[in-house]
């Protein structure tokens, strides 16, 4: 963050100093303090490199949760994460007027940069959404002896890139009956990262209930950031939900990130076809590599594709950071410029990743800058 802004208050030690002063009541709980704490991607790089083992990202997230209620700030982000993203019907209304609305916004307005319908800046919403598409329920229902696999879809796959969800269904076809609970919703990571714990807990509760309505053997998540949040944060979020204790424990035992699940399986039944693509660069999402230690599995799967070779990037953050890219679009784009420059150096034909937010960030960055490279979820290269 310091590299892009040059502000001492925005590095990890600066934010921790602010939090220390806030805890000792030397600083008030106000919008200015929350805004300073919002200049953090929660990528975990500072904690990874801290010799003292201080989890600055966790402390910053906790600081946001204290301030968001006391200062009454971040109202538009709370509205988006709690009242729009989890509700498909409301997004359908927004979809119907997306283009018309933003044609009337001046190019100089910050809102144009944050929420424009220009596909170089903000992607168009899919029509229909993934979960509104017609699939047999459960998929492969004639093969009753096969395991029942619940697929947690996530917002970005559902609303923006349904082709990723369709690729997941094709990939899972040999392994069992795929269940798509219609009541599943946002994983809650955007709300959690901004400090809105009440909304994050409510969404966690809704997802546990959605996947508890019928027998399911596994719950697979293709978005690595959704998986990280559910696996690492749901236990604490739902720790005091005594009424849901049995359902929560069962849910968490079944949840697994998709690439890890597949790497434990016999992949001979998948038999990926040889691609015209020859070189693929893989981007590790920050949450996945630091919290789930998830790096080798997607690469192992991609190497199984005949004729495909992997090239490595420098491992930089893409700059999306949940709602960070909407709160601070200019800084977000500056951070993205670094991995985009890395892509230019490695000359890969395709950038693959396992996080839907990273995928969207790179897609928009490539379109905006006119680069000739395709951006895919790794699962799309497997089918």
Image (spheres, helix red, strand yellow):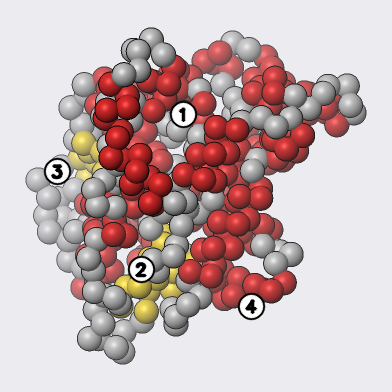
Task: Label 4, secondary structure: give it.
Answer: helix
* CB atoms of marks 1 and 3 within 8 Å: no
Q: Nearer the viewer, mark 1 or mark 3?
A: 1
Sequence-wise first label, 2 or 4: 2
> Gap in Å between the C-alphas at discs 2 and 1?
29 Å
Q: Please, is residue 292 above or below residue 48 in the view?
A: below
Q: Position of residue 199 (x, y in %)?
A: 61, 50
Q: Is residue 332 left or right of residue 381?
A: right
Q: Please, is residue 89 above or below residue 169 in the view?
A: above
Q: Residue at x 25, y 86 (%)?
A: 143
Q: Residue at x 50, y 54 (%)?
A: 187
Q: Please, is residue 108 above or below residue 165 in the view?
A: above
Residue, disc 4? 246
Q: Residues within 10 Å of mark 3 (few under 14, many from 20)?
A: some
Give the quarter of the image for residue 233: bottom right
> Gap in Å between the C-alphas at discs 3 and 4?
46 Å
* CB atoms of marks 2 and 4 within 8 Å: no
Residue, disc 1? 325
Q: Position of residue 259 (x, y in %)?
A: 38, 59
Sequence-wise first label, 4 or 1: 4
Q: Is residue 84 left or right of residue 130?
A: right
Residue lying at the far bottom of the rendered structure: 145
Q: Is residue 106 left or right of residue 38?
A: left
Residue, disc 2? 180
Residue, disc 3? 277
Task: Label 1, secondary structure: give it.
Answer: helix
Sequence-wise first label, 2 or 3: 2
């Amino acid at each position: 963050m310091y590299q892009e802004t040059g502000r001492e208050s925005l590095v990890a030690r600066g934010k921790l100093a602010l939090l220390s002063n806030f805890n000792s009541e030397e600083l008030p709980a106000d919008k200015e303090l929350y805004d300073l704490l919002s200049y953090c991607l929660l990528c975990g790089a500072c904690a990874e490199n801290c010799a003292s083992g201080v989890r600055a990202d966790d402390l910053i997230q906790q600081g946001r949760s204290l301030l968001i209620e006391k200062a009454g700030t971040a109202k538009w982000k709370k509205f988006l994460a709690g009242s729009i993203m989890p509700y498909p019907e409301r997004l359908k209304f927004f979809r119907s007027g997306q283009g018309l609305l933003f044609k009337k916004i001046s190019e100089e307005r910050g809102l144009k940069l944050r929420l424009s319908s220009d596909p170089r800046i903000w992607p168009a919403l899919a029509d229909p959404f993934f979960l509104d598409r017609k699939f047999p329920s459960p998929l492969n229902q004639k093969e009753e002896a096969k395991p029942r696999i619940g697929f947690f879809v996530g917002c970005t796959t559902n609303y923006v890139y349904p082709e990723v969800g369709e690729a997941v269904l094709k990939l899972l076809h040999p392994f069992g009956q795929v269940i798509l609970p219609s009541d599943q919703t946002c994983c809650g990571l955007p709300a959690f990262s901004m400090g809105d714990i009440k909304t994050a807990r409510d969404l966690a509760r809704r997802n546990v209930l959605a996947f508890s309505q019928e027998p399911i053997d596994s719950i697979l998540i293709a978005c690595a950031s959704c998986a990280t949040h559910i696996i690492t944060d749901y236990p604490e979020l739902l720790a005091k939900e005594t009424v849901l204790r049995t359902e929560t424990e069962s849910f968490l035992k079944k949840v697994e990130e998709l690439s890890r699940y597949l790497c434990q399986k016999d992949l001979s039944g998948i038999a990926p076809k040889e691609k015209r693509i020859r070189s693929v660069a893989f981007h590790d999402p920050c949450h996945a590599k630091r919290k789930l230690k998830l790096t080798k599995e997607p690469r192992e799967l991609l190497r199984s594709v005949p004729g495909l070779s992997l090239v490595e990037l420098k491992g930089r953050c893409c700059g999306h950071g949940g709602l960070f890219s909407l709160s601070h679009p200019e800084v977000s784009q500056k951070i993205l410029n670094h991995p985009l420059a890395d892509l230019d150096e490695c000359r890969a034909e395709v950038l693959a990743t396992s996080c839907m937010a990273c995928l969207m960030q790179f897609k928009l960055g490539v379109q905006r800058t006119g680069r000739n490279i395709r951006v895919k979820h790794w699962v799309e290269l497997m089918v």
